[in-house]
Image (tube, rainbow, N blue to C red):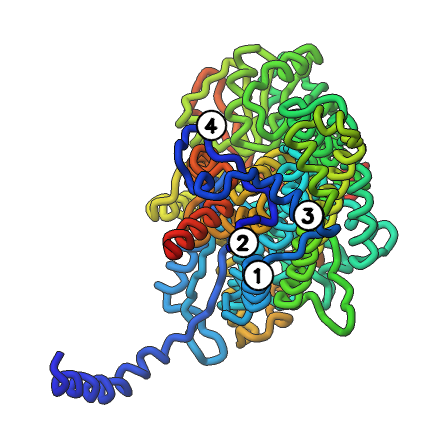
Amino acid sequence: MKPRNLSAAIVAAALAWPAIQPALADDEELKIGVVAAESGSFVSAGNTIVAAAKLATQQINDAGGIKIGGKTYKIKLYIRDNRTDVNVTIAAARELVDDIGVKAIWGTETHDFSVSMAKITGAAKVLQFSGNSSLGAVLDDKSVAPGGWLHYTFQSEPQEWQRSGSTAKGVLALLTPLMAHPPKHSVVFVGNDATGQYLSSHYVKALEAEGQQVDLVKYPPDTTDFSPLLTRIKGMNPDIVHFWYNGDSTLTAFPQALKLDVAPAYFLFGVDPGIYQQRQLKSDKPVTLSCVPVCWGSSPYPVVQDYFKKYFDLGASKGPQSSVSLLYYDYFFMYAKALEEVGSIDKPDAVVDAILKMSYQGVVSPVPLTFNAHHQVTFATEVCLVKPGTSDQFNCTVEQPPPAPPPGDTGG
Amino acid sequence: MNETPHFPEPAPPVGRRRDIASERPVTPPAVQSEAKGRSGWVKLPSREETVVAIVAVVFLVGFPWCNPGYRFLSLAITTGFTSIALYGLGLQFGQAGIMSVGHAAFLGIGAYTAAIMAGRFGLGFWVALPFSALFSAVIAGLIGLPSLRVGGQHYIIITFCFCALLNIALTNGGSFTGAATGLDVGSIDPIFGINFDQLRNAYYLVVAVLLISLLVTYLITNSSYGRTLRAIRENEALARAVGINTGLHKIGALMVSGAFAGVAGVLQAYYLRHISPALYGPFPSLYLALMVMLGGARLLYGPLAGAIIVSFLPEILKLDPIDSRIAYGVGLLVVILLLPGGVSAGLLDIYRWLLSKRRR
């Protein structure tokens, strides 16, 4: 470019700048971070967080953004792949909190990572929404109090005794009429990792509260050949085998159980009817399924169906964990509503208080979402019965959680 | 030019008829080291080594001033405590010739000792640091006892089994180990008014311990003890025949290595502030072995180079974990075939080759 042309361009840009400036200033930016596994072994769970965050952000921004204190804020998402690595998770959280200055973080999919991340977000007064129900083990009066390290952390999955209670009730209610005699003996088959140990401890108590005699069998997390353990379970003569956490392993173990004819009835936790249909699984024995939190393959609720249509239209994959996205989606709207009530994005303590007082009707549950004093949410669980001999005929029901933990379960 | 390296040179790769090593004096490097070392308990660094050391210290200390951002500073801390563990593995493998693929277990012992001391007895970082190092050293010594009777791949399998067993014990340890959920750790207590919750201060703490590790490694490898370990590595039967108590020295090397890992584990626990068994299983152990082989176990800066490569390569090249593993696998094959002394030895060879060309 000749010097004269260059000068003209600079002058033109200088003159045009004031005209451009108000347009840019109209929309303020609300920085929100997402830390999730977009690669590595937890990718199927991590991708659901990212997809849900993108969908919620798009919908909020398309609707005009969030009105906070007389200004309009558009959400700017900062998505960081943690590569299923705790060191990268910490680095990503540090970057989002200290370099970028986000106001809230969604993620991660893993208990250990979420806990380590909470030490960073808590100190920086950045809100954190994590799905892990195992957070219940550390969310207590002291940790969530002002000044506590989890004061800004919210568990977006229900307390485990609630989910276990509603699931156990739903499974037994659906299976009992199809069995030769009322089931009395259950075997819970679970992956032996942090989440598996935590989840199964509550589910065993919930089944016992429903009158079941329960045996617990654990498998190493990377197991692919389940036949030795399944043969052992068959020798226990169970009425129902409950494939508890996790859904991916269950999809490997369940066909092996069918071949070995391990039990007269089964329950598959975390396997969506959509996946059951996709895999063309078929059993002559009654099978029940449940999803976290509601099923994308066969939900009776139009609002859920509408959500998943939009979710999959965005390009999200139809996987065993797709429904988990709902654990993160609703809370974007809840957080936005809290910011509107507080009237500022720079008062995190007030935002925490606003969320704790809020009752929000989301997609995830037919009843409004509320957080308890330990920053844990409550909602029901959907359980579906597969018609024996079919892969695509389901009867789904939603069981409300019990009012209190069963005997022997300390809650959390 | 002073041709004497401060560590013995790696053996020339099989199949290379002429390489840089062959252009050096014919005296075997190990003998050169021995000859130099006899002048005193520890060989003093050459001018070349001093310059490299100064550059390394300036780089490590100056890194936060280059405005790397919190993400890179965070990864640098991770690289730092990993390097400390690798210096232990480097001593054990590079000097004594005892490879381990269960080294993460000793990090785990250090980390869990610190977490249990904090949780059960209210003892903080500064007490846990020496105690965990000592405890890890003792356990490493006990686990090393089979190495007196078996070596090579047999001992490697023992280390792998120990790591897997420890993982099972931690996962099923109930409230004492926090089971699979793990244990939480608080902050590092301030000392001299320095708040280690600030990332830069945490970085300098890790760098300080790393520099001490480097110094200890240098002193050991350039001492008569280091020469003894190398003699055992090269020919254990011969070493025993000349009166060296090989068992005692091997256990000693393993205990030093365990102490390094214990220190690294404490730093890791207080950095992550939450630990779980998954961090100390066979897979992280294999990564440690990979790092030390990539970087080079026998040269002073080899473990550091290995940790930097494995920590930062995926970050800089934006590799996902699958691509990273493929890259590490290919890299390891290349190193085994072309650079048996690791990347650091390869770089040293290139430097010497360039220097010799310039002089000609």
Q: Regarding mark 4 in the picture, which secondary structure is present there?
A: strand
Q: Are marks 1 and 3 in contact (CB under 8 Å)?
A: no
Cα separation between marks 2 and 1: 9 Å
Check the residue under mark 2 and report the chain it is in.
B
Residue B64 percent location from the top left of the image:
55, 68
Q: From the image, state whether disc 2 or disc 1 is nearer to you.
A: 2
Quarter where residue B73 is shown:
bottom right
Label at residue B2: 2
Residue B46 percent location from the top left of the image:
59, 57
Q: From the image, state whether disc 4 or disc 2 is nearer to you.
A: 2
Q: Are marks 2 and 1 in contact (CB under 8 Å)?
A: yes
Residue visible at 38% across and 59% down in the picture: A59
Q: Regarding mark 2 in the picture, which secondary structure is present there?
A: loop
Judging depth in this view, the residue of B230 and A131 nearest the camera is: B230
The residue type indicated by label 4 comes to: Phe
User: Where, quadrant-wise, is the C terminus of chain B in this rendering?
Assistant: bottom left
Image height of A152 relative to B148, above or below: below
Residue at image mark 1 = B47
Number of marks in the rendered image: 4
The residue type indicated by label 1 comes to: Arg
Q: Regarding mark 3 in the picture, which secondary structure is present there?
A: helix
The residue type indicated by label 2 comes to: Asn
Residue at image mark 4 = A394
Cα separation between marks 4 and 2: 80 Å
Q: From the image, state whether disc 4 or disc 3 is nearer to you.
A: 3
Using residue A386 as the reference point, say whether residue A16 is left or right of it: left
Q: Are marks 4 and 3 in contact (CB under 8 Å)?
A: no
Residue B228 percent location from the top left of the image:
72, 38
- Marks 4 & 3 on one chain: no
Residue at image mark 3 = B37
Q: Are marks 4 and 1 in contact (CB under 8 Å)?
A: no
Image height of A277 relative to B30, above or below: above
